[in-house]
Every structure is written in structure tokens, then in C-alpha cells.
Amino acid sequence: MNIDVFTLFPDWFRWFGEQRHVRNAIERGLELDHVDMRATSPLDGGRVDDTPYGGGAGMVIRVDVVEAALEARYGAQRDHRIVALAAGGRRFDERLALELAAEPRLSLLCGRYEGFDERVHTELATDVVSIGPYVLSGGELAAMVVCDAVIRKLPGALGHADSAVEESFSEALEGAPEYPHYTRPVDWRGHGVPDVLVSGDHARIREWRLEQARSRAKG
Ligand code: ADE
């Protein structure tokens, strides 16, 4: 899989790409690149934004700047998912992470300031995605969240082959949050571990975990 992040803060993604689990994914074939939208801007001095029509506070990232960045990377041909990160977009969830992980190529567009000119959403992006109902200073952290969740779905990204299969919101857990985990010590300041987990009865353990996940789903 190839993920390209379009950003005004390329250093953030240099750091991200150096993290162990991301490096593991890269060793297994993930290509994670970034495009500095200032460097590809057709405007003088690497300008990327402008004042909003109709007035109002803040600046808006121009559609021609994003188009130039995409063209610098792909030429005129674009036939893959292009995801703009924006607070008002489709809510990111496990299902969307799986869907995106199945794509051979993904572009993530990170907005800043007041966000993108609306025509970036309607004419250049295939998807507009939000990681939650709050406003971040830009799309970079959101793009990292998306990358992280998607990378976990790639074959071999996790140390243990089963870790992604039976994690929160997975099919194995009927879409529920994950069951509680315990490890040593078995008694910590009088707080113990559920007997079933130390019983060695794997069928009962499986049943207990599914029950726990289901009851967490109910909230
Ligand atoms: N940009 C600003 N806020 C955001 C959010 N909640 N999700 C995605 N991108 C954003």
C-alpha cells in the first residue's frame, strides 16, 4: 500500500515515519510519503491560503494549491481514494479503517487555518473524513490517526498475528469494544484477576471475553 500525506508540516510525518510500528509496516511493503504543499505551490513565495469570500476570520487553503500538489505527485491521472481531513466530514471508524486499508494507494490532505476551499472537498477529494466532533488546528493529527488505524490492518504490521483480529470493534468481537486484559501480579493491593482467566479453560475464557465485550458495547 502507498500512503501520501499532503501537508504544510512535513516534519510531523518524518517523525511519524520513524516510529517502530510504522517502520515495521514500511519494511513489509508500506510506502509512506509526504508532499509539502508549500513547495509545490504555484503562488509566489510558497503561499497556500487566501482570505475567505464573503468575509470572516481566518484564511482558507486554495483549491489551485491543492490541485498543484496533487499534480506534482501524480500528474493528471488520479484514480485512487483522496481523503481530505476536515472536522465536518464522515466520522472515521473501524469500518472505514478496514475499507481504506484495502486500497492500493491513498492520499491524505491536511488542512490548516479555516480549512480547505470547499471545492477541494467536492472536486478534488473522493472522501471528507473527520476523526471526531471537535476542531483541531489542522488535519495532520487526524491524518496520523487515520494512518495509524489503517497501518494496523495491513498484514504483518503487528507483532502478533492475532492482535488485530480480536481487537476492539473487530468482527471477531461482533463490533464491540475489546474485553478487559490482566497480567501479573495476580493480586495487586487486594485487587485480583477474574478466576476464569487463570482457570486454563479456554472455552470458558473465550465465552467470558465475548460476554465482557458485549456488555461494554451496551455501555
Ligand atoms: N481538521 C480539524 N479538525 C478535524 C477533525 N476533527 N477531524 C479531521 N480533520 C480535522
Image: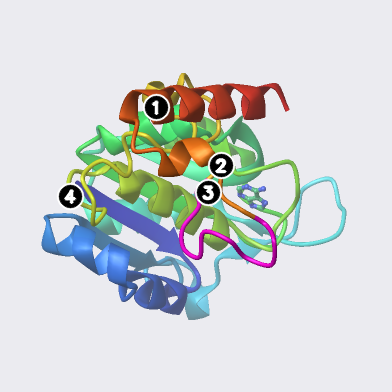
Whether residue 87 is in magenta: the answer is: no
Amino acid tagged 1: Arg
Identify the residue at image location x=55%, y=22%: 211
Residue 72 makes an appearance in the image: yes
Pointer 3 local density, CA inside 10 Å: few below 14, some 14–19, many at least 20: some
Magenta-highlighted residues: 181-191
Q: Nearer the viewer, mark 4 or mark 2?
A: 2
What distance separates the C-alpha of mark 2 from that of mark 1? 13 Å
Task: Give the residue type at disc 2.
Answer: Pro
Q: Residues within 10 Å of mark 2 (few under 14, many from 20)?
A: few
Residue closer to the observer: 6 or 119: 6
**130 or 170: nearer the viewer:** 170
171 sits to left or right of 117:
left
Secondary element type, mark 1? helix
Of the numbered discs in the image, which one, if any, rests on residue 63? 3
Taking the spot 57% from the left edge, 54% from the top edge, the residue there is 62
Relative image position of residue 187 (x, y in whole percent): 58, 61
Using the rendered image of the protein, determine whether residue 126 is visible from the camera's viewpoint: no
